[in-house]
Amino acid sequence: MISIQKQDFSLGDEYAAIRARAGDAGAIITFTGLVREMYGADSTAGAVQSLTLEHYPGMTEKCLQDIQQQAEDRWPLLASRIIHRVGELYSHEQIVFVATASPHRQAAFESAEFIMDYLKSKAPFWKKQKSENESSWVESRDTDKAALDRWQKT
């Protein structure tokens, strides 16, 4: 199940829902990403005032469904959930939620990490950060590509 939405989400409600859908899970892993106050090593721009996420409706949902399906094909998942927010978000707000449930903890951990790595590198979201001193588009990082590359080897 995927959602792309402007409104915030409740961690408790999302956990309860995946637990109910997962049935006899041995592990449920959740990840919540937050808007950071500083991006990258270069903090000359100042603290982030907001992060605006844009996407292409239709294409983004399809991409997230594909990422979720790849995880479900690769690991024995009983349930999974992806929420990604769009619009203008502020420092410390929730931006992304990933949950995976499996009979085994390793599969739950790996699948959640796989989904996050693919979301960071492949999902069509465009991020523009606004700081005290400037406004700029967020570039992808070499570390994001390296994280994605490791899944090609396994």
Image (cartoon, helix red, strand yellow):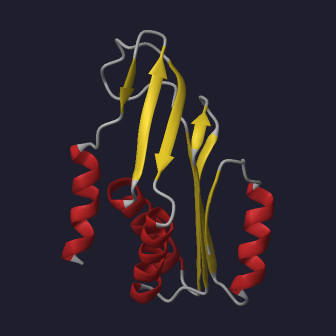
- 22 left or right of 131 in image: right
Is 135 drawn above or below residue 87 in the view shown?
above
Classify 102 as above or below 52. Answer: below
**Residue 88 locus on image (x, y percent):** 59, 35
Q: Quadrant of the N terminus?
A: bottom right
Residue 124 horizontal/vertical position (percent):
39, 56
Residue 70 image point, x, y percent: 40, 81
Q: Quadrant of residue 146?
A: bottom left
55 to the left or right of 81: left
Would residue 109 be found to the left or right of residue 153 on screen? right
Quarter containing the C terminus = bottom left
Q: Residue at x 49, y 17 (%)?
A: 47
**Front residue of this view, candidates 8 and 102:** 8
What residue is drawn where x is 79% and y is 59%? 12
Query: Image point 52% across, 35% down: which residue?
Result: 52
Image-based side of 50 in relation to 23, left or right:
left
**Residue depicted at x 52% and y 75%:** 108
Counting labels gives 0
Q: Is residue 41 above or below residue 75?
A: above
Give the image quarter of residue 45. Answer: top left
